Amino acid sequence: MVSEGEGVNLENLVVAAFVLLSSYWLTRCLSSPSSRLFYLLDYPNERSLHSHPTPRIGGIAILGSLFAGLLLVYAGRVSGWLHGAIWSHFDSFQIQQIQWILLLTLCIAVVSFADDRVGVSPGIRFGVHAVVACSVVFGVGVKIDTIAIPLLGTWVLGDASAFLTALFLMWIVNLYNFMDGMDGFAGGMTVLGFAFLSGSAWIGGHEALGALALFIVAAAGGFLVYNMPPAKVFMGDVGSISLGFLAGALSVVGISAGVFDVWVPILIFSPFIMDATATLLRRLFQGKKIWLPHREHYYQRLVLSGWGRKRTVWMEYVLMCVCGCGAILYTFLGDGARLILLGGWAVLYGVLMVGVRMVEKKNSQDV
């Protein structure tokens, strides 16, 4: 059962402020060459949009500050001065779920850091992603059992639910990494996306899930200060892979617990989901090797067409806010209005994709 929360309380805000400041401080410290072990540079390549080597340790700062905040919560609960923060609204099963997810986040972060540091073969990397995704389904015990289509009925996934949930998690993990290719983009998606996810969780009565998502917002917020264009630091694979996993895992937890409908997190994270999925399918149909690095995502095409990073990222922020507000609104609508909203959402992305092609065409004519 989902516990009935009281909204954002002072204790949660205190912890979030601590996480925000910790993330800001850690990002600043770790981006210095003196940090030695954690100092890694991202060199320009055929996938990137930046032109000079940039530190990529932001993910360590994000996760470090997040776990520092959770340790503060635990210490506060033990000492008795934190009564309303995240753990107070968990039953024992919910505590186990979150502990599993945090443990799995650490596992995937360690492998991602090794990949950033020395390189890990794609087989090992995807193998770990598969094990972690299956652990969410069978270890945490959550999965997506049904998909409701407004006015058209409910699709019961049945025996395929475990496989499809694991596949969804693996896709979210990897698309988050694919989309981390522009200053302020993945950091902004994390701040705005998890903010709307947090709000949806509180609306659904799951304060614990809402608080955890809020802490992730704070952790990404401290990093984003240094990641806005022109970026002084990137999050690296340890950040994008781990945040993708948290986005997917917390979404599945909320869906499984009946906190929100499956379409809510899909709407929230759709700026990433739609771009990455459409790009993958387009490259697949064109007979291209989809595993090779490229600069064919819609946001990359906008930048390369002359929009620039700053203008493109702010347009994406507006899109994130529109989709997030749509997700919140979806919760309060009847089936007919929900179907209209989903239809409008699909039309919006169709218009945006055509718009990108028009910008490219205009740019080529001007040249």
Image: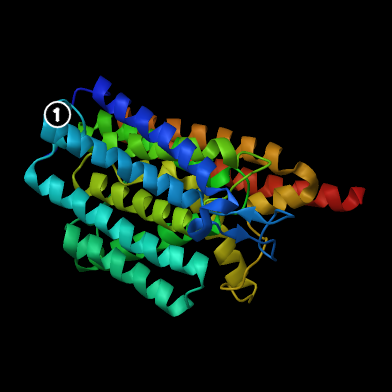
Up-down relation of residue 203 to residue 312 (above or below): above
Is residue 326 visible to us here? no
What residue would you read off at disc 1? 4
**What residue type is disc 1 on?**
Glu
Q: Is residue 288 left or right of residue 186?
A: right
Looking at the picture, tell me which residue is in the foreground, 345 or 210: 210
- Quadrant position of the N terminus in the picture: top left
Q: Position of residue 124 (x, y in %)?
A: 40, 77
Outermost residue to the top: 10
Looking at the picture, tell me which residue is in the foreground, 229 or 277: 229
| Residue 286 occupies quadrant | bottom right
Outermost residue to the left: 92
Looking at the picture, tell me which residue is in the foreground, 80 or 33: 33
Q: Residue at x 38, y 47 (%)?
A: 64
| Residue 328 occupies quadrant | top left
The kind of secondary structure element at disc 1 is loop
Q: Position of residue 140 (x, y in %)?
A: 18, 57
Q: Position of residue 56 (x, y in %)?
A: 56, 54
Is residue 55 visible to us here? yes
Q: Residues within 10 Å of mark 1 (few under 14, many from 20)?
A: some
Q: Residue at x 45, y 68 (%)?
A: 114
Colour setup of the view:
rainbow
Q: Position of residue 126 (x, y in %)?
A: 41, 72
Q: Residue at x 14, y 45 (%)?
A: 94
Q: Is residue 350 left or right of residue 123?
A: right
| Residue 197 occupies quadrant | top left
Outermost residue to the front: 34
Q: Residue at x 48, y 52 (%)?
A: 273
